Image (spheres, helix red, strand yellow):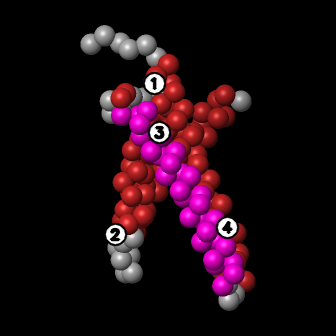
Amino acid sequence: MQKTLSALWKLFAAFLCVATPTGIVLMLSAEDGVDFLDVIGAILSVPGAIGVVCYAFDKTMLPAGFWPPFTKILGLWTALCVVIAVWEAIAIALNAGHWSELIALLFFVPLTLAITYFVWIGVRRYTERLTARPATPA
């Protein structure tokens, strides 16, 4: 079971290594402009992906003092994403003109929330692992 979970985290980390830069490029090339929340999400996604990769592959990157406050910020961001997603889902559901919009909503909102949640879980677990390890003398 532990090997299966480890393999799934590694697969998720590999997915984030592709999805993060792809998402940033797509965001920057959007014709309708860049939203402020999109920029914040892009900024947080890079260290989030690094944290998941470090957790999945048991590596250490960035100073250990960076991760505890970042985990709290990412937790707040995750909560904000949930609120925004629910708010937008309600607005789209009330104004949906086609079933295709509702079907897309039922697929993409939970997928986005799941990815955001698992990034936060990975970073939180990585931070807990770093704080549980004794400091090694330099």
Amino acid type for the residue under numbered disc 3 = Thr
Tag shown at residue 71 = 3
Is 84 covered by the magenta stretch? yes
Ranked by sequence position, the earlier of labels 4 and 2 is 2
How far apart are the alpha carbons under marks 3 and 4? 27 Å
- Mark 1 vs mark 3: in front: 3
Q: Residues within 10 Å of mark 4 (few under 14, many from 20)?
A: few
Q: Nearer the viewer, mark 4 or mark 1?
A: 1
Outermost residue toward the left in this view = 138
Please state the extent of the stretch shown in magenta in the rendering. Answer: 66-95
Q: In terms of secondary structure, where does tag 4 sit?
A: helix
Residue designated by label 2 = 28
> What separation in Å lies between label 3 and label 2 (alpha carbons)?
26 Å
Residue 20 sits in quarter: bottom left
Magenta run includes residue 31: no
- Disc assigned to residue 19: none
Inspect this view and state whether residue 124 appears.
yes
Task: Report, in whole angstroms, how far the alpha carbon at label 4 lies from the one at label 2.
Answer: 24 Å
Q: Which comes sooner in the sequence, label 1 or label 3?
A: 3
Q: CA distance from mark 1 to mark 3?
A: 12 Å
Please tell me whether mark 3 sits on a helix, a strand or a loop.
helix
Q: CA distance from mark 1 to mark 2?
A: 34 Å
x and y percentages locating residue 43 in the rendered image: 36, 54
Magenta region, mostly helix, strand or loop? helix
> Residue under circle 4?
107
Residue 14 visible, this angle: no
Residue 68: where, in percent of width, then height?
Answer: 43, 33
| Amino acid at pointer 2 | Leu
**Which is nearer the N-term, disc 3 or disc 2?**
2
Q: Which residue is mark 1?
A: 130
Q: Residue furthest bottom?
A: 97
